[in-house]
Image: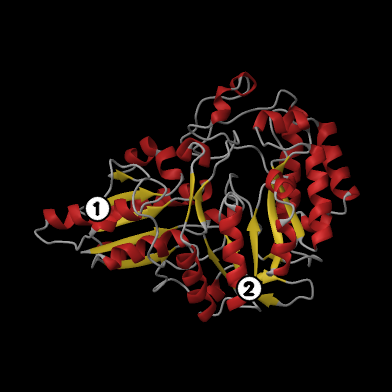
Amino acid sequence: MRVLLVSTYDLGRQPFGLASPAAWLRHAGVDVDCVDTSREKLSDERIAAATLVAFYLPMHTATRLAAPLIERVTCVNPSARVAAYGLYAPLNAAWLRERGVNHVLGPEGELELVSLAAETESENGRRVQKDPAYIVEGGSFRTRRMTLTPDRAGLPPLNQYAALLMPDGSTRVVGSTDATRGCKHLCRHCPIVPVYNGRFHAIPVDAVLEDIRTQVHAGAQHISFGDPDFLNGPTHARRIVERLATEFPGVTYDATIKIEHLLTHASMLRVLAGTGCLFITSAVESIDDRVLQHLAKGHTRADFIRAVQLCRDAGITLSPTFVAFTPWTTVEGYEELLRTIEELDLAEQVAPIQLAIRLLITSGSPLLALPDIQAVITEFDPASLTWPWRHRDPRVDALQRSVMQSVSARSKARRAVPHMTEAWYCCAEPSVEDMRLV
């Protein structure tokens, strides 16, 4: 049989979510074809050759982009089984099944895909190799973890993905990997929460380093850690970056870390700086303590300001991300956000898109339990996979539309800090350029 794994978008990175299950499937003797439609066209011939087609849905944009491709697969190859896996698959299970998806799997689809491939082959009178690594215990997360190195064979080369742009105008080839899965925090707006409910686990250090080693040999000069929070396991993170720096002293990296963790583990900042960390992305979301409390972010405005200084003292660029427009945003509050960014000398460190992002309320979001949210949402919109909302003050909605038009039209000017050539953001509506990927 042949399994076709499809990724539609993964923040400009070579998708870990294809490479990891590809390793498990190939280890089981399954023929695997990987297609990243953000970088290459998916032909009808590749669809027709597949017995099982599985879509990787790690984020909102990827899920939206998958819709026309799912329809195409069911038309081109109606006998193929269709599956979806990744963080946004269980969140949108009913919607996916309505579009012809037969199997909705979890965010860690490796074991489930091997079992599904075995089931499919059994029906066809063939057998997929299995060993104790593939025993699923009641569909829980308590199975053997990630001991196989992701297999990136067949994916577009790293130099076709987002690059790191340095202040002097030079670029670096970027690889990416995950050191952990899930997150131990419960931020209300985060899509991880309904799926993991505060759970996370570490991928073995040797497996992470082997994946990095493979990518460095393929040309990577910088590694982007895709963990929701790199310091969910600080000791684990330290072991990884110290080994990274020892084995590949010229390779730099970046990571995503909560403001709360930057303060709690402030001593780690020197370690990160000394091992090649160029910048840290942190989901600040707001500078309004009232909004931060509604979002259950676990930090305050003062904490954010302190984290900016700690990173500066350590010599690491802090790249804050924001959800600038929420039902609690005011025109005056937005103006205060702009002033604060200026006063903290962060203008170069904030990607323009961060000033336009509007809160997405997805299926299963804990935000739906808040009376303030219930008061502003309309009916669930299957086209956007969200609960649309209108601000009580129409000036705020008008401002958001105006800012989005402004940042979308803004040219990509050189910034004085290291940053990716594709701006980091998730939990946002796909852009017009994103939707052209299919």
Quarter holding residue 100:
top left
Q: Which residue is mark 1?
A: 115
Alpha-carbon distance for marks 2 and 1? 38 Å
Q: How is the image coloured?
A: secondary structure
x and y percentages locating residue 161 in the rendered image: 56, 69
Q: Is residue 276 above or below residue 284?
A: below
Disc with the residue nearer the chain's start (2 vs 1): 1
Residue that sits furthest to the right in the current view:
343
Q: Is residue 415 above or below residue 94?
A: below
Q: Nearer the viewer, residue 257 or 101?
A: 257
Decide: few, some or many residues near mark 2? Use Cα within 10 Å; few <14, some 14-19, many ≥20.
Answer: some
Depth check, front residue: 139 or 98: 139
In what quadrant of the picture does the N terminus appear?
A: bottom left
Q: In the image, what residue occupies the spot 63% across and 23% down?
A: 376
Judging from the image, what secondary structure is the residue with disc 2 in?
Answer: helix
Q: Is residue 387 left or right of residue 394?
A: left
For disc 1, the neighbor class at 10 Å (few under 14, some 14 to 19, many from 20) is some
Which residue is tagged 2? 245
With 88 as the anchor, is 110 left or right in this view?
A: left
Q: Secondary structure at mark 1?
A: helix
The image position of residue 261, as x and y in percent, is: 68, 47
Residue drawn at x 74%, y 39% is 286
Q: Quadrant of residue 253?
A: bottom right
Judge whether residue 76 can be spotted in this image: no
Residue beneath the point at 12% across and 53% down: 123
- Give left or right: position of 173 versus 18: right
